[in-house]
């Protein structure tokens, strides 16, 4: 499928007529082209956004809410088409695209369409001064949204929905590796009656198209999800212009298992938290720490379950593990597996490329479990972002807490225990933006979402996202 930019409500080729090949991860073949947009396309998107901003920012909350909810209904109605497109573009199992990615993209619009109607601002009476203060929450203006390839439409809309709900106009760039569902979203926005120019979707490479967004002096805020190195670069470029930034970055999340947990539930969920979406979710629990008393049992049971996961073409309903997103990414993950061997890690299962019959050039990799000799080895410290987890035992709460916190990242952590006091102690001390206890990736869109340390700056989700996409202005009136 060929993709075009969506600027000022119309699909158009890039100004310079330059194109990039788009590969299908399931078979390694080119199946379409996407714009290799330049600064000129970003400028056109900016001009379109700027011209409609006065109108959009003055549209009633009710009207904005109605349009967002209409977009969510149209996404629901087009679930199958969008899920097939996402699965083909990204390599993820169709079952996952159908039950998680696309329903969540629809929920993002529904949630923020409703949330904006409840977004109240404060007022304070200055008693003794005969004055009253009230705080306005005004849209920022033109904002930039840049998203990665792992949950393409899910994360793209997680930014766009609150941005437009709050009255901003958007210049957005999805990952050039997974552009298709963002392209299809343009059609739906038009059909839902979103005014031209409110959302502009420009496709292209990070270091040109993306760079033009972050360098644009009048794009006042950037919401970015992606790698930590890119996040650091964006912060550097944005700082002299004092742009508002929300950075959702990498993770290397601990999954801490105590002997007193509900074992079967833990085992089942740990397979999912390790390998869902081929382990390409920033929240995956890629470092598994198991209390020594149950370590050997866990090791045997876990490996047995992982070996049963079905690797196959993403379009097949019974596939558990689809293809990795790209050839370079597959090579990167394989390099980490080799590194593990050099670091005295033991590959308990997996570790090899998989040849799927009829799709020999697809980017398939076995789910891999590595028993590491020390928590300080590189495979246990660096983000791999693939179907690879490390496991090791621990003896005490203090010992595991120290190891869990001893990485540069701090996105999420999972804890398995039925001990309430331990739950409280550990949840409060784990260095992470999100802690799950006896579950994983149970998301409530009202909650703050984001990381600490090298996992990012700022929070999205619920009113946090609406706060990010607005400027607070206090008005003080003496009466
Ligand atoms: P990247 O940082 O490579 O890219 C993310 C986005 O930024 C892409 O659209 C990319 O474009 C763009 N980009 C790259 N360079 C620039 C630049 N100079 N200026 C502006 N934009 C740029 O991340 P990946 O796409 O590889 O995604 C994987 C990473 O995302 C992992 O580290 C993962 O942990 C993280 N992530 C974090 C999440 C969170 O919520 N904290 C959630 C999901 C993923 P292009 O692809 O075209 O190069």
Image (spheres, rainbow, N blue to C red):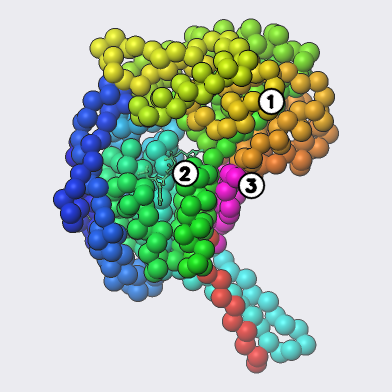
**Magenta region, residue range:** 444-467
Q: Measured along the vertical axis of the image, is residue 189 above or below residue 329?
A: below
Residue situated in front as seen by the camera: 47 or 314: 47
Q: Is residue 64 visible?
A: no
- Residue pointed to by mark 2: 226
Q: Quadrant of ligand 1?
A: top left
Q: Nearer the viewer, mark 3 or mark 1?
A: 1
160 is higher (above) or lower (below) than 401? below
Earlier in the chain: of badge 1 and badge 2, it is 2
Residue 154 appears in which quarter of the rendering? top left
Residue at (62, 87) in percent of width and height: 477
Residue identified by numbered label 1: 375
- Return the residue at label 3: 452
Does 448 appear in magenta? yes
Between disc 2 and disc 3, whose residue precedes? 2
For image coordinates 44% across by 27% down, the residue present is 332
Residue 216 position in % (x across, y down): 37, 64
| Pointer 2 with pointer 3, Cβ within 8 A | no
* Cα gap from disc 3 to disc 1, whole angstroms: 20 Å
Give the residue at x 81% y 37%: 425
């Amino acid at each position: 499928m060929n993709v075009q930019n969506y600027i000022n409500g119309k699909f158009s080729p890039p100004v310079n007529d330059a194109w990039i090949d788009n590969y299908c991860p399931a078979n390694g073949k080119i199946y379409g082209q996407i714009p290799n947009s330049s600064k000129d396309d970003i400028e056109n998107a900016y001009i379109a956004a700027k011209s409609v901003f006065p109108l959009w920012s003055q549209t009633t909350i009710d009207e904005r809410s109605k349009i967002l909810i209409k977009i969510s209904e149209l996404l629901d109605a087009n679930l199958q088409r969008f899920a097939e497109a996402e699965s083909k573009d990204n390599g993820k199992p169709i079952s996952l695209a159908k039950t998680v990615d696309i329903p969540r993209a629809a929920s993002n619009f529904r949630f923020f369409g409703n949330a904006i109607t409840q977004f109240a601002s404060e007022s304070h009476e200055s008693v003794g001064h005969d004055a009253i203060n009230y705080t306005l929450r005004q849209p920022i203006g033109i904002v930039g949204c840049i998203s990665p390839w792992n949950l393409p439409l899910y994360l793209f809309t997680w930014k766009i929905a609150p941005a437009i709900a709050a009255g901003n106009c958007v210049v957005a760039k999805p990952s050039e590796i997974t552009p298709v569902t963002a392209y299809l979203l343009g059609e739906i926005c038009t059909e839902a009656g979103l005014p031209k120019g409110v959302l502009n979707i420009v496709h292209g490479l990070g270091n040109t198209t993306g760079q033009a967004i972050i360098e644009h002096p009048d794009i006042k805020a950037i919401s970015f999800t992606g790698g930590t190195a890119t996040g650091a670069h964006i912060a550097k470029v944005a700082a002299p212009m004092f742009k508002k930034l929300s950075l959702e970055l990498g993770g290397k999340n601990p999954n801490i298992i105590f002997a007193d947990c509900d074992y079967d539930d833990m085992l089942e969920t740990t397979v999912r938290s390790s390998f869902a979406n081929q382990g390409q979710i920033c929240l995956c629990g890629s470092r598994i720490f198991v209390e020594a008393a149950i370590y050997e049992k866990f090791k045997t049971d876990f490996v047995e379950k992982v070996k049963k996961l079905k690797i196959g073409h993403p379009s097949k309903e019974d596939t558990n593990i689809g293809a990795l997103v790209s050839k370079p990414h597959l090579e990167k993950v394989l390099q980490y597996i080799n590194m593990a061997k050099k670091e005295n890690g033991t590959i308990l299962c997996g570790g090899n490329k998989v040849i799927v019959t009829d799709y020999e050039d697809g980017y398939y990799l076995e789910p891999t479990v590595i028993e590491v000799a020390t928590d300080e080895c590189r495979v246990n410290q660096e983000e791999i972002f693939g179907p690879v987890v490390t496991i090791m035992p621990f003896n005490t709460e203090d010992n595991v807490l120290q190891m869990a916190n001893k990485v540069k990242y701090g996105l999420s952590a999972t804890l398995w225990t039925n001990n309430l006091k331990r739950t409280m102690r550990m949840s409060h001390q784990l260095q992470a933006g999100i802690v799950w206890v006896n579950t994983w990736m149970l998301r409530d869109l009202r909650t703050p979402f984001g990381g600490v340390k090298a996992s990012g700056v700022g929070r999205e989700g619920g009113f946090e996202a609406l706060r990010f996409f607005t400027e607070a202005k206090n008005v003080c009136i003496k009466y």
